[in-house]
Amino acid sequence: MSDKNQKKADALFGKENYVWMAIGAVIIALGMFLMSGGKNQDPKVFDYNVVYSTTRITIAPILIILGLLVEVYAIFKKSKTTE
């Protein structure tokens, strides 16, 4: 096997794959950030609207799943090979 072919065989992902992986990681981190937080003013009082807000129980999990799908796409995406 020549050196040129060996370098192609060694490169598992291309630059575009890593960019997509970074985008997926940012989306997942954003979903985790939106799911956390929500501190009550008075710790002795349970505020249903803060704990079970639409952002926490709907938007954040959708973002996390979307980020995971972007990661799967980034892994399976064929990198462009130039000869």
Image (cartoon, rainbow, N blue to C red):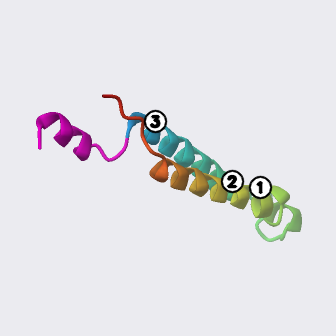
Nearer to us of marks 1 and 3 is 3
Q: Earlier in the sequence, mark 3 or mark 2?
A: 3
**Which residue is labeled 2 in the image?**
63
Percent of width and height locating residue 36: 66, 58
Q: Is residue 82 above or below residue 29?
A: above
Q: How many marks?
A: 3
- The residue shown at (36%, 44%) is 13
Quadrant showing the C terminus: top left
Are the residues at dot 2 and dot 1 in contact (C-beta closer than 8 Å)? yes
Look at label 3 and name its amino acid. Glu
Q: Nearer the viewer, residue 19 or 81?
A: 81
Nearer to us of marks 3 and 2 is 3
**Which residue is labeled 1 in the image?**
59
Q: Is residue 5 above or below residue 59?
A: above
Q: Magenta stretch?
A: 1-13
Look at label 1 and name its amino acid. Ile
**Which residue is labeled 3 in the image?**
16
Quadrant showing the N terminus: top left
